[in-house]
Image: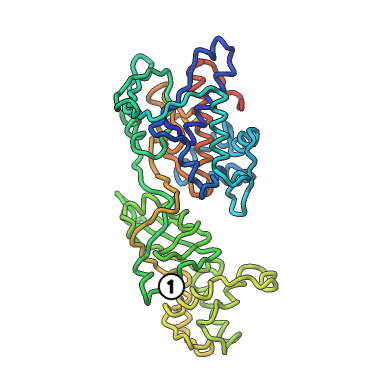
């Protein structure tokens, strides 16, 4: 096992438990090693979710629904999530080992202790029970396959950096999104999908300056907004445009925009943003439930007769708030579709004077305001890292991996799991779900390779 992160440790303890289930004369002759370049295990688990570890996403959802959270790898994970090690299997694995979990409103699942150490202790204790040997501060610098065995060059940082060679019958590459793992995979004739950042916030410094629409709005949030990135076609079909749309809660920051809608867009358009050096335009619909610009214009025009003496810039009109929400929405007095501070900024951006009453608003005013609500063009100037998330789109090409076994199609006995593969998910537990599932399959399959027995028929836990 190369890498002591989430997928690597999960794969190691799975492989070891599978081997220990065999007769003693077989199991005693097999060892499972974890080679970790640093002095710590499961470092990403430690800091994830603000130290609480968002280890899964709402496992009550169907696998098909959960798979929609993977911009890359969605189709390839169908078998894993439905047949081999599903999100519910992962939840059972942890609960059977004493880690009780809870599901929050947004679907994120955490241990009830709200401590990532609970998850770390569970995995390490399971690895210890299954006699996994952890070899720390050992950086793998080379892998060569000779006569069906893998010769692994290991630099021991505690021993003057000298390189020793270890021989293994099977290798699981679980190095996450770190470049050394991709270099090792490439040295074994595997193709690497270009790696670019995913899960980032968007900076729009031109709009946050004094006098601009987002100035002094940091902290303002919307329950729902729609973001649209439109990019020109490439290659032979330069006329065809690609439109990427994501919707969800949005937060205005000191530097631009963040929140679930932004993170989803950054994940699904990771390569498109990278290709444009994170300088492009994103259209923001501030109240998507109200419909298109024409629908909003009709709704706003009603204000000239419903509330003629109210000021346009005072608050988001109730006609926008209740539109599309059913009869009960008006009775329950829902919160405004657009917060007051943002609404005032939109009105000013439309060129409507602050003291203008609805009875004084012209059709030109209403049309301009409706267009800004339905499609304000935000100039994106750069990106920022989202908290402690550091997810990369790219990795070992999935075309060269047998996803039923997470085994290389180039070399028998070489397996992959976790983020070293070209699989990544949106924020909210999706990336860890991939780690548990792919780690379990890789661990079982590596044990299968060693034991030369079809042990993948059942899901032994």
Left or right placement of residue 365 versus residue 125 in this view: left
Residue 393 occupies which quadrant of the picture? top left
Q: Quadrant of the C terminus?
A: top right
Looking at the image, which is closer to me, 289 or 48? 48
Residue appearing at x 51%, y 21% in the figure: 447
Looking at the image, which is closer to me, 92 or 374? 92
Residue appearing at x 48%, y 57% in the figure: 246
**Vertical position of residue 330 compared to residue 198: above or below:** below
On the image, the x and y values in percent for residue 274 come to: 34, 52
Residue appearing at x 51%, y 77% in the figure: 297
Left or right placement of residue 379 versus residue 261 in this view: left
Looking at the image, which is closer to me, 340 or 122? 122
On the image, the x and y values in percent for residue 407 come to: 45, 27
On the image, the x and y values in percent for residue 427 come to: 50, 49
Residue beneath label 1, please?
A: 216
**Vertical position of residue 65 compared to residue 263: above or below:** above
Give the crowd class for mark 1: few <14, some 14-19, many >=20 residues within 10 Å: some
Q: Quadrant of the N terminus?
A: top left
Residue 88 occupies which quadrant of the picture? top right
Left or right placement of residue 435 versus residue 204 in this view: right
Q: Secondary structure at mark 1?
A: loop
On the image, the x and y values in percent for residue 301 come to: 54, 82
Residue appearing at x 53%, y 59% in the figure: 248
């Amino acid at each position: 096992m190369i890498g002591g992160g989430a997928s690597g440790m999960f794969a190691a303890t799975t492989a070891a438990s599978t081997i220990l289930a065999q007769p003693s004369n077989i199991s005693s002759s097999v060892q499972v090693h974890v080679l970790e370049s640093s002095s710590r295990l499961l470092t990403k688990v430690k800091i994830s979710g603000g130290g609480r570890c968002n280890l899964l996403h709402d496992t009550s959802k169907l696998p098909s629904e959960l798979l929609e959270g993977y911009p890359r790898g969605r189709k390839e994970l169908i078998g894993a999530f439905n047949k081999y090690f599903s999100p519910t299997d992962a939840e059972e694995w942890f609960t059977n080992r004493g880690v009780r979990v809870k599901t929050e409103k947004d679907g994120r699942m955490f241990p009830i202790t709200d401590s990532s150490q609970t998850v770390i202790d569970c995995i390490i204790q399971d690895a210890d029970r299954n006699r996994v040997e952890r070899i720390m501060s050992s950086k793998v610098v080379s892998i060569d396959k000779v006569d069906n065995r893998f010769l692994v060059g290991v630099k021991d940082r505690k021993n003057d950096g000298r390189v020793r060679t270890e021989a293994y019958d099977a290798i699981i590459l679980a190095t996450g999104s770190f470049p050394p793992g991709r270099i090792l995979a490439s040295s074994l004739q595997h193709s690497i999908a270009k790696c670019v950042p995913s899960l980032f916030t968007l900076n729009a410094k031109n709009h946050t300056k004094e006098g601009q629409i987002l100035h002094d709005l940091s902290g303002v949030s919307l329950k729902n907004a729609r973001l649209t990135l439109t990019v020109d076609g490439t290659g032979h079909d330069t006329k065809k445009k690609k439109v990427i749309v994501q919707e969800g809660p949005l937060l205005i920051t000191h530097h631009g925009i963040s929140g679930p809608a932004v993170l989803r867009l950054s994940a699904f358009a990771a390569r498109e943003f990278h290709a444009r050096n994170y300088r492009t335009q994103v259209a923001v619909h501030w109240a998507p439930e109200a419909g298109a610009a024409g629908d909003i214009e009709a709704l706003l025009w009603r204000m000239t007769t419903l509330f003629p003496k109210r000021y346009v810039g005072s608050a988001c009109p109730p006609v926008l708030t209740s539109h599309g929400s059913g009869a009960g929405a008006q009775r329950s007095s829902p919160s405004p579709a657009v917060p007051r501070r943002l609404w005032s900024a939109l009105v000013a951006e439309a060129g409507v004077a602050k003291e203008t009453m609805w009875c004084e608003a012209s059709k030109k005013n209403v049309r301009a305001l409706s267009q800004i609500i339905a499609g304000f063009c935000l100039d994106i100037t750069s990106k920022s890292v989202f908290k402690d998330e550091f997810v990369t789109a790219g990795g070992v090409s999935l075309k060269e991996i047998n996803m039923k076994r997470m085994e290389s199609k180039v070399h028998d006995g070489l397996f992959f799991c976790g983020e070293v593969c070209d699989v990544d998910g949106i924020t909210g537990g999706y990336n860890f779900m991939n780690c548990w599932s792919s780690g379990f399959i890789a661990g079982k399959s590596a044990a299968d390779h060693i034991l030369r027995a079809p042990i993948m028929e059942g899901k032994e836990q």
